[in-house]
Amino acid sequence: MTNAVTAGRLPGTAPTTPEQARRTWPRTAALGAALIVLAVLALTWSVGPQLLLGGAGALAVLRGAALLRAARTGEVTRTGAAGGAVAVWFGVLALLVALVSATATGWVLVAAVVLVPTALAVAATGRAAAAGLGVALLAGAVVLGTVGGADALLATGRVAAAILAGVVGLADVAAAVGLARLARRPEPAPAAGCGGCACSAGGCGAAALR
């Protein structure tokens, strides 16, 4: 699975330059650290699941808004912009559910444990077999709910969602490390035959007309 560490970019974005990496790696590191903290709280505090869902929703809104802003400058493709809009929409819904009901939060986390890994697998591989992962997880959830009851299913969803958030947080921290390394690289040299002297005057075409 290609990620920001190995490719220097996120899905739907243009290749990251050192200058862009210098702007984005602190945000990526902060996002990963926040997810790890939320995961720990979800496992250790009674209101942790609501904090996890609400916090994840808030982070999704922030990430989606950042993608939409980047789309205006051409740093993100149309696919990335669409992903940003979806992130904002689902982030707002997650915030509302977390504020309204602890029980609804638990069921949303159960659904997230089934759907999020499947979506990531399908996006990463594009193989039909990845969809089987979601079917297997859903079947396991149904069996657990039948055998252990709703309480067991909600408790399992809480733990699994916390683990999933922690794994994503660690992946973001690793991606931030990769971006920080890229940020230390020098900017690419200008194309052959270009000294950069005409850039501030409108480009080489403008210089050639003089």
Image (cartoon, rainbow, N blue to C red):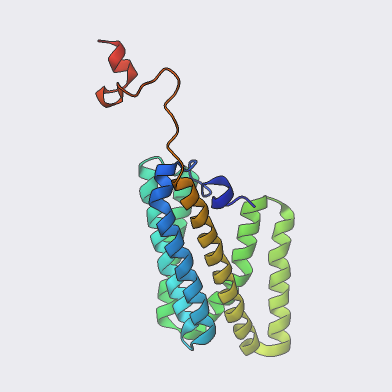
Quadrant, the C terminus: top left
Is residue 51 in sight in this rendering? yes
What residue sits 44% from the left and 46% below the top? Answer: 184
Q: Is residue 179 above or below residue 17?
A: below
Pick whichever, 122 or 22, lies toward us. 22
Q: Is residue 118 above or below residue 71?
A: below
Task: Give me the residue at 48% from left, 48% from top.
Answer: 80
The image quadrant that residue 135 belongs to is bottom right
Answer yes or no: is residue 105 visible.
no
Q: Is residue 78 above or below residue 201?
A: below
Residue visible at 67% across and 50% down in the picture: 126
The x and y percentages for residue 200 are: 26, 26
Q: Position of residue 51 (x, y in %)?
A: 44, 79
Would you place residue 64 above or below residue 59 in this image? Answer: above
The spot of residue 129 in percent (x, y) is: 74, 56
Q: Is residue 91 left or right of residue 113?
A: left
In the rendered picture of this protein, how many numbered marks are placed on residues? 0
